[in-house]
Image (cartoon, rainbow, N blue to C red):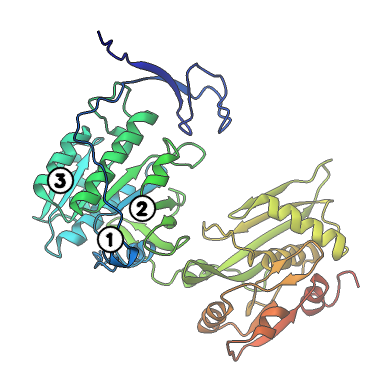
Amino acid sequence: MTSKKKNQTVFSCSSCGYQSVKWLGRCPDCHAWESFVEETVRPAVKTGKEDSGSHPVPLYLAPDGDEERIVTSIGELDRVLGGGIVPGSLVLIGGDPGIGKSTLILQTLAAIARQGHQVLYVSGEESARQIKMRATRLNALHPQEFIATASNVDRIIAMAEEMRPGLLAVDSIQTLTCDDIPSAPGSVTQVRESAFRLLKMAKKENIPVMLVGHVTKDGALAGPKTLEHMVDTVLYFEGDRSHAFRILRTVKNRFGSANELGVFEMKGEGLVEVTNPSEIFLAERPLDAPGSVVLPSVEGTRPILVEIQALVSPTNLGTARRTAIGADPQRLSLLCAVLEKKAGQDMYGHDIFLNIAGGIRIDEPALDLGVICALASSLLDQPISSTTVVCGEVGLAGEIRAIGQMDMRVREAERLGFTRFMMPKGNRDRGGWKSEMEILCVSTVQDVFRHLFMGKGRK
């Protein structure tokens, strides 16, 4: 006599997906407090029809991967996707509420529909009437666009297999449910299983799928971390809803460059591409103001010039404040220590505020020299010429290290009319590029002070 397997109860962390047989107050994996929720897991039932996978074949006989992409005609979106949407791919778009995720989805569907493809928009959050009102405002209505309101994954998959759209958009992954999973929508198990089934359908039917994902208060995608591992591409919408500019950043891309960046401006008619972000970010830059310097940054394959602003003010508090917006606060503290030790500047007696203008975030090492120059300019109350750009990595010994992609940075600075470029001496020695600008080569922090601030650093 055989006994039937009973359902099992497990506790899953809603932040990272870690599972335990008992409830825990704190997740041992991501250290989140009170994040465990109870879920029922049903035992797998073998039907004899499981997918056994493909047989091993020599790699050179495998299908080629140069399949033609679907170009959306939205240049900034095509850029972050690596040239367009790959058929059969799964793209996840995350961002804060109201940042423009649904707007971008509607504009993308309309652009593909105008090319003659049928597209399907499935919403688990809004009614068809609400979506039509938004599409009308965005001028994104087209006879080839279809809308459905559903939250059952199996039903969505059945619709997609019957219709075979050129693009399937699901808004959002946190609203989907699977009938054979008893947990609530948005739970770790539901999100993971829903994404997995959509992934299998996309690969089998060669239908590209775009998923909208919610984010937590910390800015991370809600649900298990497995979600980001499963999909082919992860895009993050960044920006402040009170400002017009939106940054679409590639975090993961199996079909193109990661850390690519697209810039949009939110207007009444929807998201409008910003094809020349350098000019936009520098448009309101104060000329010859202390604490301001321009950095030629590289995001993915695109050079972007941004303004670094610093304010260094004496403090009467026991502990000085360190605030960084758009940059790593830990890196700011490190560079302040370098200025204190290697350049003889009193940084610990001052409150220090750093800002990357335009709402953009810069993480690359080339930012270091720009931060050093902006801090010193504000501290000494000496402006840096508005025609000067700087970039380079700064080490703990006060040395200025070479950085990559210097040719792109030089060309972009020349194109926008800058006449002086301060760079690491190592980049000048490597060569490989030409410029009509005046090149200031520096190898230490003391060299920076000698060139820009009349040698007011430590000798």
Asked whether the beta carbons under mark 2 and mark 1 sit within 8 Å of each other, the answer is yes
Measured in 3D between alpha carbons, the distance from the residue under mark 3 to the one under mark 2, in whole angstroms, is 19 Å
First-in-chain label (3 vs 2) = 3
Q: How many marks?
A: 3
The amino acid type, in three-letter code, at marker 1 is: Val
The amino acid type, in three-letter code, at marker 3 is: Ala
Dividing the picture into quadrants, the one containing residue 215 is top left
Which residue does the numbered mark 2 point to in the structure image? 232
Toward the viewer: 352 or 58? 58
In this view, 201 is above or below 370:
above
Can you tell which mark lies on residue 33?
none
118 sits to left or right of 1: left
Which residue does the numbered mark 1 point to in the structure image? 86
For the question of whether residue 31 can be seen, the reply is yes
Give how far across and how far down residue 51 sits, in percent.
24, 41
Give how far across and how far down residue 114 sits, in percent.
15, 63
The amino acid type, in three-letter code, at marker 2 is: Asp
Which residue does the image show at 74% across and 46% down from the upper left?
Answer: 321
214 sits to left or right of 127: right
Which residue does the numbered mark 3 point to in the structure image? 160
- Mark 1 neighbour class, 10 Å CA radius: few under 14, some 14 to 19, many 20 or more: many
20 sits to left or right of 266: right
